[in-house]
Image: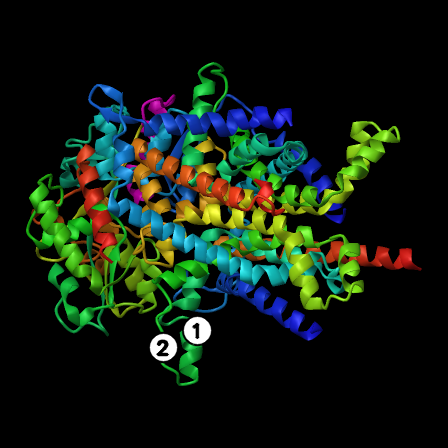
Amino acid sequence: MLPYLLWALLFIIVPILLIIYYSLCVETDSGLVFSLQNYSRVFQPIYLRIMWRSVALAFMCTLFCLVMGYPVAYIMASKEYARKGFLLFLFLVPMWMNFLLRTYSWLTILERNGIINSVLSVFGLPNIDLLYNEEAVILGMIYNFLPFMILPIYTVLKKMDQSVIEAAQDLGADSRTVFLRVTVPLSMPGVISGVTMVFMPAVTTFIVSDLLGGAQFMLIGNLIEQQFLKIRDWNFGSAVSVILMTLIIASVAIFSMVDKDSEGGALF
Amino acid sequence: MKILRVLAPALVLAVLLSGCTGGGDDQVTLNVYNWGEYIDEDILATFTEETGIAVNYDTYATNEDMYAKLKSGGVSYDIAIPSDYMVQRMIDEDMLETLDPDNIPNLQYIFGWLKELEYDPGCVYSVPYMWGTLGILYNTDLVDDPVDSWNILWDEKYSGQIFMYNSQRDSFAVALKKLGYSLNTRDLTELEAAKAELILQAPLVRAYLGDTVRDSMIGNEAALAVVYSGDAIYCIENNPALAYAVPREGSNVWCDAVVIPKGSLHKAEAEKFIDFLCRTDISLKNTEYIGYSTVNTQTFDLLPAEMREDPAYWPGEDIFRICEVFVDLGSFLKEYDRAWTEVLASK
Amino acid sequence: MKALKKLYLGLMLTFMYAPILILIIFSFNASKSRANWTGFTLNWYVELFRDPSILKALYNTITIALLSSFFATVLGTAAAVGIDALGGKAKRAVMAVTNIPVMNPDIVTGVSLMILFIFVFKFFPAMKLGYVTLLLSHIAFNTSYVILSVLPKLRHMDGNLYEAALDLGASPALGFFKVILPEIMPGVVTGAMLAFTMSIDDFVVSFFTTGSGVNNLSILIYSMARRGINPKINALSALMFIVVLTLLYLVNASDNSKVKINEE
């Protein structure tokens, strides 16, 4: 534990303090000067809207990942797949191919003259516009984050205390009840980990929205990267990140307070 | 655990191997920093053969990435190849070494007008590497109107058939030039007018694309796209239905240039390298590999006639009468950023 | 029901592998453009092995991924055990810190680590950005993923087991290796897998924390984007893919045969 705390101090807390320091300054001719100007700028409607859109897209992405990923984890953790642990790997291996190449492939699939539309026209169906809209962005996000939902859920379902389930069955619960009343609550810590690993990075993704969204949906990730690199306004970029971080930490805290009794909430 | 059985030996191997890399001797090594795929790497080997100077070649993805890295002071490079406005910013921030023309005799082969560009007149800090224009790439199967004006990008006939460039400066360059203003304007009313134009255009635009615009245009995904000439040449090679035009209202002309960042430990060798790049045989080889417009007079004469006569490849010196290079806008860039954010938010 | 399960997994795997299949197909395309199929070629594979910079970057990518996931797994597992033992506010505070690398945009992580390293170098002028800083940065963002994978498993564990082991005279270390570790192993393994994946796919943090002469594959690939990604990279991906699948198959086969022997 102590080594981790020292590590976290050096590689997490110090860099974050640095970012907070930048966020509290503005650049003037006489160097950096203390100011809250960056923060007041974050709360302009235009930036709030960007933030809201990012959170909404990340939320959709997380929801889909959960709905799609939970059954995968559940099936693979079940007895008949017990000897097929390598299947889990199969869900991770695509992520080892470079992100840009994977996303380019999605372009090939979704384009006007892409694979899906070619198949449609073979059947005489009209072409559809699948690219450069919010749905395409969400699809790209799901694709890149799905494994991060599957793995932690699989971990808790795997080797779950079978005696609990058998006890429930002995007491006459049907499989549906067992699933809803026993399996789901017991898997909550895994779900929470999965949601964390999907939602948090999803809020700040940006290349997916550039490539599959045609850059029409400016997200918070685009904004921050723009400020850091193109505009060289590290101060404003830092302020946006700090606000974003505060919002997420605060909502997690509220969530865990409301949800105090549940297994999952206690994780935080 | 089975996974550990695989990982453990691999890990040991990794540790052992990582001790083997590197190894110092007295040979001078030039650290070269460039865009990926932006040099014929055989040239580097030739350079080492001829001079005995080793080359360590690293790559970056954007001007801004390269700048942030050099500015941090954490790395030192002997050669970098930024674009025009970035050269100027680096000059302004005292990040570049001045070049000694006596050490770069092959500078004489560079076109005179390319040596007088606004960001570094007289090539005090930089030597041109490749150049080109910003214009409209269009699909002749889908466009029957003449393409000679930016106005066509506002034509409702092509709604949903237009790709704009995903960059604030380039998109504003289009709108500013359409209105007859300078694409380096620092006038807020001109900028606001351009913003209004872009907001007006936004519903017609299918997407704001970056590097993916090339393959999308080759694949007939849209009728019109704002692209750089280097990309246009590549697209036309792959899809003969495409054509390229620089609108008569004027446009941007760009030039990537070789510089020596301050902190270089091997300035003399770096100048030798720049001179080497300007040598005609090397420049020709590089031009053929990259496919962008050459900066070298002799190389130009050696190119096949169809290239020299292709307006996409060779718009000619006259283009400078209507085109401008990007100038670094300093803190005014924030205004462009704000305006661009508002354009995108209008969608 | 069994068929349904198979069908669902099949569908999901199709979703995951459709883009991979396409990028492999384009490694055989004579044209550089993915919009043009101009004929079958193996040329990119030949050229791949003539390109020392790609092979060097591949080597860096793999060693960094292995080393960083190894260290992150050790550090993260130990941290998770410690965090699990904490209660209430202290736990919430440590978890908030642990979540920071997960929620921080890459550019913020990358730039702030770069500034940190450069600041430290002021006191140790002999050091510079390179392999070690790259490795440290990867461990920095990987560790949180390991902790998030291990913690749920710890929550499921019966704490009494460990207590019992200690009561029976086991040292804490022995108790950890004999009681806790076997219980949380699935979490440790998925943590290591996720860490490896994060490391292999990272571009932004890598770019800002590496130095001259140390490239990884993603830096190489992203920097090609402006001029078009060379299909050599597709060829490399195809080869990596086949090697990984073969390894998986071999491990799985050897495992199954051992199971059979044991059963006999």
Q: Is residue A248 above or below residue B21?
A: below
- A61 vs A83, left or right, is left
Residue beneath label 2, please? A127
Residue A68 seen from this side? yes
Nearer-the-camera pick, B244 or B197:
B197
Nearer-the-camera pick, B90 or C27:
B90
Label drawn at residue A107: none
In the current view of this chain or complex, which residue is farthest to the bottom? A124
Give yes or no for residue A93 being in the magenta stretch. no
Q: Quadrant of residue C104?
A: top left
Dot 1 or dot 2: first in sequence order is: 1
Query: Residue at horizontal 55%, vertical 46%?
Result: A259
**First to last magenta residue range:** B261-284
Q: Is residue B65 above or below residue A137?
A: above
Residue B51 seen from this side? no
Mark 1 crowd level (few <14, some 14–19, many ≥20, 10 Å Cα): some
- C231 vs A151, left or right, is left
* Element carrying mark 1: helix
Magenta segment, prevailing SS (helix, strand or loop): helix
Image coords of residue B24 (percent x, y): 54, 23
Query: Residue at horizontal 14%, vertical 67%?
Result: B155
Image coords of residue B302 (percent x, y): 25, 51
Query: Residue at horizontal 55%, vertical 30%?
Result: C136
Do badges 1 and 2 share one subunit? yes
Residue beneath label 1, please? A116
In the current view of this chain or complex, which residue is farthest to the top? C123
* Element carrying mark 2: loop
Give yes or no for residue B262 being in the magenta stretch. yes
Chain label for disc 2: A
- B332 vs A121, left or right, is left
Q: Quadrant of residue C76?
A: top right
- B323 vs A37, left or right, is left
